[in-house]
Image (spheres, rainbow, N blue to C red):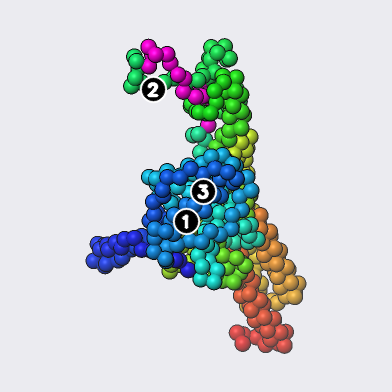
Amino acid sequence: MFEGRILQPTTDQGDDRVLSESYLCEDEKAYLHDSIQSWKKIEGNRTGEQLFREALKVHNEQVEEYKRFEVGHIDMPNLSDNVRFIDDTSDTYDTISDKLLDNDNIGGEIRIRKEDGVRYLDWVQEVGEKKDNDIRLRKNLLEMTKELDPTEIVTKLFPRGERLEGDEEDEEGSRNQSKPRLTIAEVNDGKEYLLADQELINEFGIQSKSETWDEVTQANNLLRVGKQFLENQLVATGNFTIKALDLSLLDIDPNRFWIGNTYRVYNPLMNVNEDLRIVGMTIKINEPEQTELDFGAKDMTLTEYQNSLTKEQRDYTELQQRVEGQSRTIRKLEGNLGDTDQRVVDLRRQIDEGTPPDYEENINTILDRIQDLVGEIQRVSQSVPSDETMESIDSTLRELKEFQRTQEENNSMIRQRIEWLEEGNTGNG
């Protein structure tokens, strides 16, 4: 159930002259945009938690009762005691986001929780939990898009530290100019930049970027943090968009897909076999079982990035070879099926001519051959991962089983005909 507010309705008329209406909505966390914070300096213990509580206090004083939040669970163990400030130009949501959630040294996520009619705002390290139901081909995975984005990689880094102060003449001559920053040139053979490992450069070429550390005042320290940045950087992010069937609505899977929860995703064709976390959902109201899921970016090291590309190429080549091999097998099976069908025609002709053969042996041979063909096609069906190929094989299998059923009926008629002939009858009886 959705709880929030409608922002704007939109009415559209299509070429068929049918009117449709759509609505842009936002959930209850948007109420935090309806209040403006006041300036305040916060110091002492766990200043991050103090800021969170103060921000909600100011919010509740400014808005209607139905927009208020109580402070909920705070599960953030590493809140530092640094002095913090709340400025007086931001709304409550932006204040909490900028000062806490988007702060690299703090982080966390907020969620709304309701108990006994009270709306709580929790601040936790991560919303959601690991669920048992998985997403995989030939079960509930309909479509999948995987994007590898290596554009943020840095192979040539220009570290920058604090702003440098100039002398009085400099101040006067460049009053409106920005001051230069501390560089690593004096401790790095006159070079202001650091290069990444040659392997990264070979893979991505030269990609330059500057990084600024305002709190660094010594060139040696700036050199150290610059090297650490290059060593710790991740070369790419993997983004996944999946359209999947929510089988919980059919009582097949135990849990519904939901934002924040983590699920195992298995797609061997795209080299994906890992736990991924849902960060966004698109739900069709008239087809809620067909849900589009957005999964959070997965950071990748150079080795993971290279392995992913290499394995996808290798898997694609192997798949092509397997499909070609199975296609040859299917053509051979179709030929064998044609031979079996001809044998049945010959058997019918012999009976109609009044020369009954050893019908039990012939019928049993035909049935055994059909059973062998069914088993062979089932084996082929299980070994091909392509849904399109599987659909073709499954169709052939259904046709073959239908042929087997029809043949059993014909065999019954053949037995009756032979028994009638053995009793000395002639003609078409």
Q: Residues within 10 Å of mark 2 (few under 14, many from 20)?
A: few
Estimate how packed mark 1 is, as few (under 14), some (14 to 19) or many (20 or more) residues with alpha carbons within 10 Å.
some
Task: Estimate the spatial distance between the alpha carbons at disc 3 and disc 1, rounded to whole Å.
Answer: 10 Å
Q: Which residue is nearer to you in this view: 382 or 263? A: 263
Number of labels in the image equals 3
Q: Determine whether the residue tagged by mark 1 lies in a helix, strand or loop.
A: helix
The residue to which callout 1 is attached is 57
Does the magenta segment cover residue 230?
no
Q: Which residue lies at the image location 68% right of the left edge and 59% below the top edge?
A: 379
Magenta stretch bounds: 153-171
Identify residue type, mark 3.
Leu
| Figure check: 360 above or below 273 | below
Q: Is residue 100 above or below residue 193?
A: below
Q: CA distance from mark 3 to mark 2?
A: 32 Å
Per the image, label 3 sits on a secondary structure element best described as helix
Could you tell which of marks 3 and 2 lies nearer the N-terminus?
3
C-alpha span from label 2 to label 1: 39 Å
The residue where tag 2 is placed is 178
